[in-house]
Amino acid sequence: MTLNTVIDLTQKISAVLSIFLNCFLTFLIICKSPKQLGSYKYLMLYISWFEIIYSILDVITSPVMFSHGSILVSIVYIKNSKIADWVALILNSVYCSFCGISMGMFGINFIYRYFVSTGSKYLKTFNGFKIIFWMMIPVVYGLIWGFIAYVILGPSKEIDEQLSEPLMLTFGWEIQDISYVGAYFYQIQSDGSLIIDYKSVVSVSITFAIVFSSFLVMCFCGIRCYIKINTLLNITNKHNFSTQSKNLQSQLFYALVTQTIIPVILMHFPVSTVFVFTFLDKDLGFLSGITSITIALFPALDPIPAMFIIKSYRKSIFGFFKITKVKSIQIPRN
């Protein structure tokens, strides 16, 4: 199987799983959430619905990340589709925007858990309509990333010239059969000299800063949450929280930790690696395509930790399968 076939197959399978699991998690959040969950359930719904839309967009665009030397592009293959080139460019930019939104959501998730575990006065900013402010932060991240992709990093003849051969060797695609957005850091001139394309450097630096800021927020808030929750669990008599509330906070934290490992491995690390190698003019070639696979897997795997770590959700799932099993072995009476 060729790399583009593996990527396409992974994206389709992951999308189906993501839509099913996130819809099921939505049901659990709405119908089976404990009262102590509070405003956090709205964040969980926000993330689940986002991941459903993200998966649908992933199938429609089937983007492929590709790196060649100091060139990094997100490619949409349009030869066998009815999508016009300008539509593909917009969809590709929207897809990049969704990558930015996902980075912002990771940070907001951890900030909320940090406020809860520390009893911060700022926790009230997540109540009522105020939570919309927090939900808009990832949107701003996404708008910045999407704007950069569409306005600054659109197709160019310089990238066309350099990508034609490696694109054919790696995927068997002609340059006219694709739509892409991308950066070209060190451009080769006709006399063999190199010039730095500062718009590419600045643009990718901004997107990398979005990835890095998300990672830093998760690390800072995650460590503080871990320390605080352990304190609450070990010194129960000195706090006003009930044992049930403390156990819930512990469940939410470990769900969050698990949900963080998934994006770090599938999104933060691969995307950062491709950015750094391209900036250093190191050719990753087909290996950069693996990033498309890991990003596609993210929305399919992300809902699983919450479904099984949060006790009320886990009991509902096990109860459903128990009922199903009992019904399947019932013997009809004469």
Image: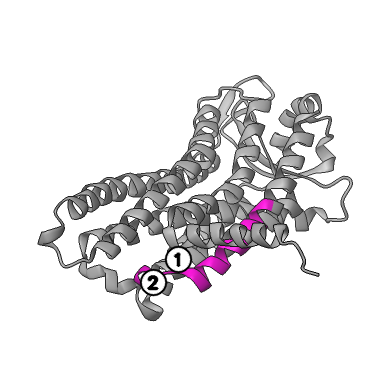
Q: Quarter holding the C terminus?
A: bottom right
Q: Main secondary structure of the magenta part?
A: helix
Q: Distance between the residues labelled 1 and 2?
A: 7 Å
Q: Nearer the viewer, residue 48 or 312?
A: 312
Relative to residue 278, is residue 40 drawn left or right? left
Q: Residue at x 54, y 51 (%)?
A: 304
Q: Which residue lies furthest to the bottom in this view?
A: 128
Q: Nearer the viewer, residue 275 or 240?
A: 240
The three-letter amino acid code for the residue at tag 1 is: Leu
- Asked if the magenta segment contains residue 126, the reply would be no
* Residue at image point 25% right, 69% down: 122
Q: Is residue 38 among the parts visible in the rendering?
A: yes
Neighbor class of circle 2 (other Cα within 10 Å; few <14, some 14-19, many 20+) is some
Contact flag, marks 1 and 2 (Cβ < 8 Å) = yes
Q: Residue 247 carries which label?
A: none
Query: Label 2 sits on what residue type?
Result: Ser
Image position, residue 266 (x, y; %) = 54, 39
User: What span is in magenta?
Assistant: 17-37
The residue carrying mark 2 is: 39
Disc 1 target residue: 43
- Residue 285: x and y in percent read 66, 25
For residue 6, above or below residue 235: above
Quarter that holds the N terminus: top right
- Residue at image location 22% in from the left, 49% down from the top: 230
Q: In this view, does 39 lie above or below 237?
A: below
Q: Which residue lies furthest to the front in this view?
A: 334
